[in-house]
Image (spheres, helix red, strand yellow):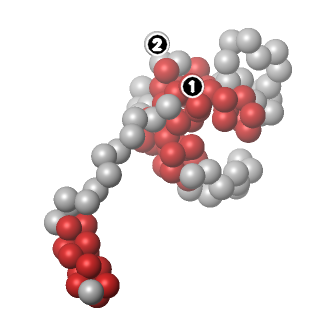
Amino acid sequence: MQTRLRHILAVIVAAGLGEVPAMAADASHGSDLAKRWCSSCHLVDSNQKQADADVPSFAAIASKSDFTPEKVAFFLLDPHPKMPNFLLSRTEAADIAAYVSSLRK
């Protein structure tokens, strides 16, 4: 019985019928994460008093002509030497990217 149930579930998932709808990224949660993890180097909001002069502010990142939230989320998930590796989940990276996107003017 368990084998048959597993087979049925596998068919449902393979057919795309068992997919969970994607949740929208949460910019508010992204703001909280950015203030906790990113503000030691980046200026993450206008109320912040200090940041590293050698890194772009989140507003500057958002204003780039080629900016997309997807690019930011991918960048955050890809290990790179210039930034500490925070081991963000995909949801956390998407939330931070949504927050950065909310700063776009």
The amino acid type of the residue labelled 1 equals Ser
Residue at image point 62% right, 57% down: 79
> Could you tell me which quadrant the N terminus lies in?
bottom left
Image-quadrant location for residue 12: bottom left
Residue 86 visible from this viewpoint: yes
Residue 23, horizontal then vertical, whole percent: 39, 40
- Give neighbour class at mark 1: few <14, some 14-19, many 20+ (Cα, 10 Å): some
Q: Which residue in the protein does label 2 denote?
A: 105
Residue 64 visible from this viewpoint: no
- Give neighbour class at mark 2: few <14, some 14-19, many 20+ (Cα, 10 Å): few
Residue 98, horizontal then vertical, whole percent: 49, 31
Nearer-N-terminus badge (1/2): 1
Residue 6, horizontal then vertical, whole percent: 29, 80
Q: Nearer the viewer, residue 62 or 20?
A: 20
Q: Which mark is residue 71?
A: none
Q: Nearer the viewer, mark 1 or mark 2?
A: 1
Which residue is outermost to the left?
Answer: 15
- In 3D space, how far apart are the residues under numbered discs 1 and 2 (Cα atoms)? 17 Å
Residue at image point 32% right, 52% down: 20
Residue at image point 16% right, 66% down: 15
Q: Which residue in the protein does label 1 denote?
A: 28
